[in-house]
Image: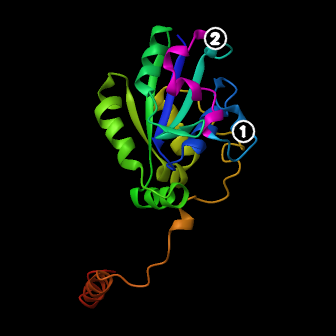
């Protein structure tokens, strides 16, 4: 049976990144245009039309590969208009075409996600995604997993190997191009050094006290 993995996340959570990684393998049909460019407009994603018009999806879309990955942010822009993607309807349509469908929601630190959305979209849109995920997507009956942007950059290929097992989906995690275009954690530009925090002195005092009593060798 062919398999479709749908990945989604709030705007700016890492949709392009995860789509590139999951599309890298030669066994997988996906957003191959991202393999040579850092960024491609979302309405050029191979499944873009189906998030708006799910009934137009046919089995021709799944020719050539047994594993497919489709990606969409929530909300997303298509032909200049913002939509909440019809992910459940696409999953249902693909299921009627004989595919085994799994869904994965990308997560990113909520504060960084908000800063990214304000920078790019001038508004915070995560609540739109959460409302759809909690009220429609998760109760849909399809398997739903959560993927972590932070865990990806902390554990890299080890996390991808784990993802492959959990999702039962081929991921080419040893491919040297898996992190192409990514030379640092994308969260780093939003993080600043904290000179002092109210708890620091209490922690330091506790450490010094233990040393004085010979507890901390």
* Dot label at residue 54: none
Which residue in the protein does label 2 denote?
A: 60
Q: Nearer the viewer, residue 156 or 111?
A: 111
Does residue 204 sit above or below 125 in this rendering? below
Farthest residue, direction right: 36
Q: Residue at x 67, y 34 (%)?
A: 24
Sooner in the amino-acid sequence: mark 2 or mark 1: 1
Q: Position of residue 105 (x, y in %)?
A: 43, 38
Direction from residue 41 to residue 146 in the image, left or right: left
Residue range highlighted in magenta: 42-60
Q: Quadrant of the C terminus?
A: bottom left
Q: Nearer the viewer, residue 68 or 171?
A: 68
Look at 49% across and 26% down and name the residue there.
168
Q: Position of residue 211 (x, y in %)?
A: 30, 87
Quarter location, residue 86: top left
The 10 Å Cα crowd at callout 1, few under 14, some 14 to 19, many 20 or more, is some
Q: How many marks?
A: 2
Label 2 and label 1: CA atoms lie apart by: 22 Å
Assess whether residue 51 is covered by the magenta stretch: yes
In the displayed structure, 91 sits above or below 217; it is above
């Amino acid at each position: 049976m062919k398999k479709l993995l749908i990945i989604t996340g709030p705007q700016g959570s890492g949709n392009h990144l995860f789509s590139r990684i999951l599309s890298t393998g030669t066994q997988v049909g996906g957003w191959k245009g991202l393999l040579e460019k850092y960024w491609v407009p979302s309405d050029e994603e191979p499944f873009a039309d189906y998030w708006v018009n799910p009934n137009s999806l046919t089995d021709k879309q799944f020719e050539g590969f047994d594993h497919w990955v489709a990606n969409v942010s929530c909300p997303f822009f298509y032909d200049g208009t913002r939509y909440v993607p019809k992910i459940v309807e696409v999953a249902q349509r693909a299921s009627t075409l004989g595919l085994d469908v799994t869904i994965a929601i990308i997560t990113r630190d909520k504060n960084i996600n908000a800063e990214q959305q304000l920078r790019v979209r001038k508004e915070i849109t995560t609540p739109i995604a959460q409302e759809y995920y909690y009220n429609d997507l998760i109760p849909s009956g399809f398997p739903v997993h959560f993927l972590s942007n932070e865990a990806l950059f902390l554990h890299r290929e080890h996390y991808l190997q784990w993802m492959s097992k959990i999702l039962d989906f081929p991921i080419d995690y040893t491919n040297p191009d898996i992190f192409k275009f990514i030379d640092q954690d994308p969260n780093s530009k939003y993080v600043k050094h904290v000179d002092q925090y109210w708890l620091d002195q209490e922690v330091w005092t506790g450490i010094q006290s233990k040393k004085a009593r010979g507890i901390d060798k």
